[in-house]
């Protein structure tokens, strides 16, 4: 169910009556199963060497493809088993961001905010964050706000406050109905009944309450998973990836055990079938990020 860097076979094309040729192989992000069905070659990121992961995307990045440049930047930032190369990440993020890639702009802003590969500069971070959302005035505020880069932490967030009662008014219909904002979806996960880890209390009930608030108060289409296995979570993410388009909106809520990596820069969600000291049975934050990145 995990997304992989898939290298699809080239297409056999015919030019006129006498010339038949094979096009270059095409990289794409898709599930391992889909890659296999289409005859592609892949190596999962968590098993790939640095050179193998780069092999898929670097040629296309050098040709100017913004998505490929962003992937190469993320490979360098995350390290993939070697020390992260933030200077190289900054180079590729900048190329893609200057060409108008929103995620690359957010990632570049994060490097400036944290001082990774570049001098720490909150003002520059704010400029790139504003460019990522299409702001025409990219002048940073006097006191730049906290990071807008999504962070997938294992902590359980507090429940949102219930919505205020509706106001009866003779005003015209809300502007939102005239805008192409897409549908609002939520994946809500709450795990209590762990098989090999200490049992939690309240995570599943909290998830159900969050789902009720999002559905009844805000009109979300909610998928609820309680006491979910690794397969359950990945299958739900893969289903959303296939159903949502670029106009839709997705919120993910997770309550359950989590685990940070020793360096503190990455972490894991622990499904109910996760085993102690066995990261292969957990769900890496990076894997969640991959699913979210593939949805845009």
Image (cartoon, rainbow, N blue to C red):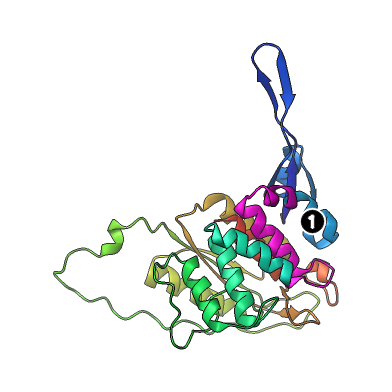
**Span colored in magenta:** 58-86
Query: Residue 62, image x and y in percent?
Result: 70, 51
Query: Residue 198, image x and y in percent?
Result: 76, 83
By secondary structure, the bulk of the magenta-drawn segment is best described as helix
Q: As drawn, is 183 to the left or to the right of 14?
A: left
Q: Which of the two residues, 23 or 210, is positioned nearer the viewer here?
A: 23
Q: Above or below — where is 245 with respect to 102?
A: above
Considering the image in quadrants, where does the C terminus appear?
Answer: bottom right
Query: Residue 259, image x and y in percent?
Result: 75, 79
Q: As drawn, is 182 to the left or to the right of 255?
A: left
Q: What residue do we see at 85% from left, 72% from top?
A: 278
Which residue is the site of mark 1? Answer: 53
Is residue 150 visible to us here?
no
Considering the image in quadrants, where does the N terminus appear?
Answer: bottom right
Q: Above or below — where is 291 with respect to 147?
A: above
Q: As drawn, is 45 to the left or to the right of 28?
A: right
């Amino acid at each position: 169910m995990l997304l992989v860097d898939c290298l699809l076979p080239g297409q056999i094309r015919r030019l006129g009556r006498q010339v038949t040729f094979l096009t270059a192989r095409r990289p794409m992000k898709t599930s391992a199963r889909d890659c296999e069905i289409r005859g592609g070659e892949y190596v999962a990121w968590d098993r790939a060497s640095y050179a193998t992961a780069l092999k898929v995307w670097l040629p296309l990045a050098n040709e100017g493809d913004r998505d490929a440049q962003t992937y190469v930047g993320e490979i360098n930032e995350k390290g993939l088993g070697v020390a992260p190369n933030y200077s190289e990440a900054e180079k590729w993020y900048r190329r893609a961001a200057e060409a108008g890639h929103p995620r690359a702009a957010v990632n570049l802003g994060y490097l400036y905010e944290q001082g990774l590969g570049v001098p720490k500069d909150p003002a520059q971070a704010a400029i790139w964050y504003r460019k990522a959302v299409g702001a025409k005035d990219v002048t940073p505020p006097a006191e730049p706000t906290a990071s807008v880069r999504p962070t997938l932490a294992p902590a359980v967030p507090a429940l949102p406050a219930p919505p205020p009662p509706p106001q009866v008014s003779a005003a015209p219909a809300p502007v939102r109905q005239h805008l192409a904002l897409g549908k609002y979806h939520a994946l809500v996960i709450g795990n209590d009944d762990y098989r090999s880890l200490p049992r939690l209390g309240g995570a599943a009930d909290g998830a159900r309450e969050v789902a009720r608030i999002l559905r009844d108060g805000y009109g979300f289409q909610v998928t609820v998973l309680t006491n979910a296995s690794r397969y359950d979570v990945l299958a739900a993410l893969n289903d959303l990836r296939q159903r949502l388009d670029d106009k839709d909106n997705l919120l993910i809520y997770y309550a359950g055990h989590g685990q940070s990596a020793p360096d503190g820069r990455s972490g894991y969600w622990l499904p109910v079938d996760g085993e102690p000291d066995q990261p292969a049975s957990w769900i890496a934050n990076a894997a969640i990020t991959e699913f979210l990145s593939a949805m845009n």
